[in-house]
Structure formats: structure tokens, C-alpha cells
């Protein structure tokens, strides 16, 4: 049956995303998703993150069934099929046939290999050992906390993180928690179970809330009353703190060096109806016109929670 090009295959998008991460060293936040509709984009990102979150164990299964590691196009197709079968419970015939189809579009001569290995994967079991932290981080964590805590962190990484939301209007917290079926955290953030399609949730199109880890929402709260104050948000994209500050009445300047991530920040501002001055620049070289009342910086870091939320980071 011919593929309907009007219906983008999330597996094909996920395959492209894996290539961008593993061969081009691009973060998923900066990857090219094409013009796929929101539901296909959400599924593709979820599938790519599942593969990256479990890539070590998945590769153990695949390499045990091959004489040598397959070329990247075939390997990524097998990783996707293995993740679907062994983690998500997708029927083998569906996962393998789709893996073969997308391989033949990317590398026609490798379709037979993917078909043969994919059928063998269907009878395999994923190893119990979770994917390890990146070596530099793992060494530091083991040295500070020991083997048991290190393995506990790695086990936690194997589970998809929950979805935390920050409301534009904090007075609506109880109403939105009931409407979304969310838990209210002590910090005021709302928490949903992992796996929800963000763009399909009530309030998304209206800009009533945005996705932001509960821990990431705390620093703005610590600033107290920012209404009318000039606040500079450094390393601002994708803009959670910028939105918080704007919602609290601050005069916000949002600065980031990444043009791709600033696109997301501008979209979030437009969706929520909030405003901020957005500047693309290197914070080490940029010179402001005048002083600020406060400067917010949540610098990119190597905390293990960052790896859990961004399984592409170690790669």
C-alpha cells in the first residue's frame, strides 16, 4: 500500500531526529521537525526521546543479534522498532514493517537487514540495567554519593518525567487543576502524568499556561514583587521565566544566543498574550542601555535532572 504523504509518519520524523542528534550533535529543541502537524510532532519527539533514554539497553539487544553494528540509518530504524516492541508494547508486525519501510526510504539496500534483525528483536527482552549517566557526570556522582544512589538516579531517568505547568494567572490554580486533572504542587505549579499531548490540553491555545518544570519556576518566585521593575532574563529561551516575569508585571528583557530557541520564546509570548523585549546576543558581549532592577540567570547546567528531561543531551 502506498504511503499517504499527507499523513507524516511519526516514525520517519523520529528517524530524522535521531540522525540529527547522533550524527550532527543537534539538540532536539533545535532539530528540524519539518511541517508535520502537532500530533505527529508530539509522537515523533516522544519516540525519539524514548530511544535516547534507553539507547544503551536497546543497543545491547540489537548488537547481540548482529555480527557488527549496522550503518546508522539501519541502526536508528532498529532502535525505533525495538523501543516500540520492548518498551511500548507495539505489535511486532507493525513495528518491524514500518522500520523496514522507513529504512528503504533512507537506505534502500538495508531494508532486508532491518527486516531480519527486527523479527529477532521481537523475541528478545530488554536488559534490566538502565542507561548509564554520561561518564564525566557518572564519575562525579559515584565519587560523591556511591554506587547505590548513582543507580537510583539512572533508574529514575528510565521513566518519562512528569509534565509541570505554570499558570498565567495564579488565582485560577484550583480551577485549572480540576479541569486538567492535575495535582497542585506546594510551589503552585500544576503536575500532570507523563505522556500528555501538550497542544491538545485545555488552555493551551488560549495561553492560560505554559510548560515549565516546578523547580525552574522557583527562582522568579524568590524575586518577590517585580511589578513595574526592569528585569533581565539571561539564557532566556525557551522562555518559562520570561513568561513568569511578564505575567507578574515586570518590564522584561529576554536575552539568548540561540536564534532557534528564541523562535519558541516568541511563539510562547504570542500564545500567552504576554510581552517582553527579545534580544538575540551573547551575554558575554552584549552591553545594555542602562541598569536593571534584577537579573535572572538559569545557566545551562549538568544537573542529573537536566539529563532526565533532555535524554538527547549526553549524545
Image (cartoon, helix red, strand yellow):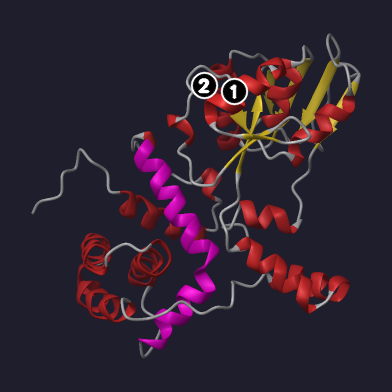
Q: Camera-side residue: 53 or 284?
A: 53
Is residue 148 shown above or below 4? below
Tell me the element at label 2.
Answer: loop
**Which residue does the image show at 51% across and 69% down from the upper left?**
55
Is residue 92 shown above or below 44? below
Determine if the magenta segment contains residue 50.
yes
Task: Sort mark 1 into few (<14), some (14-19) or many (20+) by Cα contacts within 10 Å.
Answer: many
Residue at image mark 2 = 203
Residue at image mark 1 = 176
Residue span colored magenta: 39-65
Q: In which quarter of the image is residue 186?
A: top right
**Which residue does the image show at 59% across and 36% down from the upper left?**
261
Q: Which of marks 2 and 1 is in front?
A: 1
Left or right: residue 27 compared with residue 80: right
Left or right: residue 17 compared with residue 146: left
Quadrant (top left, top right, bottom left, bottom right) of the N terminus: bottom left
- The Cα–Cα distance between marks 2 and 1, rounded to whole angstroms, is 9 Å
Q: Can residue 226 be seen in this view?
A: yes
Q: Where is residue 53 in the image (x, y as percent from the top left)?
A: 54, 62
Q: Camera-side residue: 108 or 226?
A: 226
Amino acid at each position: 500500500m502506498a504511503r499517504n504523504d499527507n499523513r507524516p509518519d511519526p516514525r520517519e520524523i523520529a528517524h530524522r531526529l535521531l540522525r540529527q542528534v547522533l550524527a550532527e550533535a543537534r539538540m532536539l529543541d533545535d532539530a528540524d521537525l519539518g511541517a508535520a502537524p502537532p500530533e505527529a510532532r508530539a509522537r515523533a519527539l516522544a519516540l525519539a526521546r524514548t530511544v535516547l533514554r534507553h539507547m544503551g539497553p536497546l543497543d545491547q539487544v540489537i548488537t547481540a543479534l548482529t555480527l557488527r553494528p549496522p550503518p546508522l540509518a539501519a541502526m536508528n530504524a532498529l532502535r525505533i522498532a525495538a523501543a516500540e516492541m520492548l518498551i511500548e508494547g507495539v505489535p511486532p508486525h507493525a513495528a518491524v514493517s514500518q522500520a523496514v519501510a522507513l529504512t528503504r526510504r533512507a537506505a534502500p539496500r538495508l531494508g532486508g537487514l532491518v527486516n531480519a534483525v527486527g523479527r529477532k528483536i521481537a523475541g528478545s527482552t530488554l536488559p534490566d540495567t538502565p542507561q548509564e549517566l554520561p561518564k564525566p557526570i557518572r564519575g562525579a556522582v559515584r565519587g560523591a554519593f556511591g554506587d547505590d544512589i548513582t543507580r537510583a538516579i539512572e533508574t529514575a531517568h528510565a521513566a518519562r518525567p512528569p509534565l509541570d505547568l505554570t499558570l498565567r494567572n495564579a488565582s485560577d490554580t484550583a480551577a485549572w487543576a480540576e479541569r486538567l486533572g492535575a495535582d497542585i504542587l506546594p510551589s503552585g505549579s500544576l503536575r500532570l502524568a507523563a505522556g500528555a499531548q501538550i497542544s491538545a490540553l485545555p488552555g493551551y491555545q488560549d495561553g492560560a499556561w505554559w510548560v515549565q518544570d516546578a523547580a525552574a519556576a522557583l527562582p522568579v518566585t524568590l524575586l518577590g514583587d517585580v511589578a513595574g521593575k526592569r528585569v533581565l532574563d539571561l539564557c532566556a529561551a525557551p522562555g518559562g521565566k520570561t513568561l513568569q516575569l511578564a505575567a507578574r508585571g515586570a518590564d522584561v528583557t529576554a536575552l539568548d544566543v540561540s536564534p532557534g530557541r528564541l523562535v519558541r520564546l516568541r511563539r510562547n509570548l504570542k500564545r500567552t498574550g504576554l510581552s517582553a523585549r527579545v534580544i538575540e546576543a551573547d551575554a558575554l558581549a552584549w552591553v545594555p542601555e542602562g541598569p536593571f532592577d534584577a537579573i535572572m540567570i538559569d545557566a545551562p547546567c549538568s544537573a542529573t535532572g537536566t539529563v532526565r528531561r533532555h535524554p538527547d543531551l549526553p549524545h
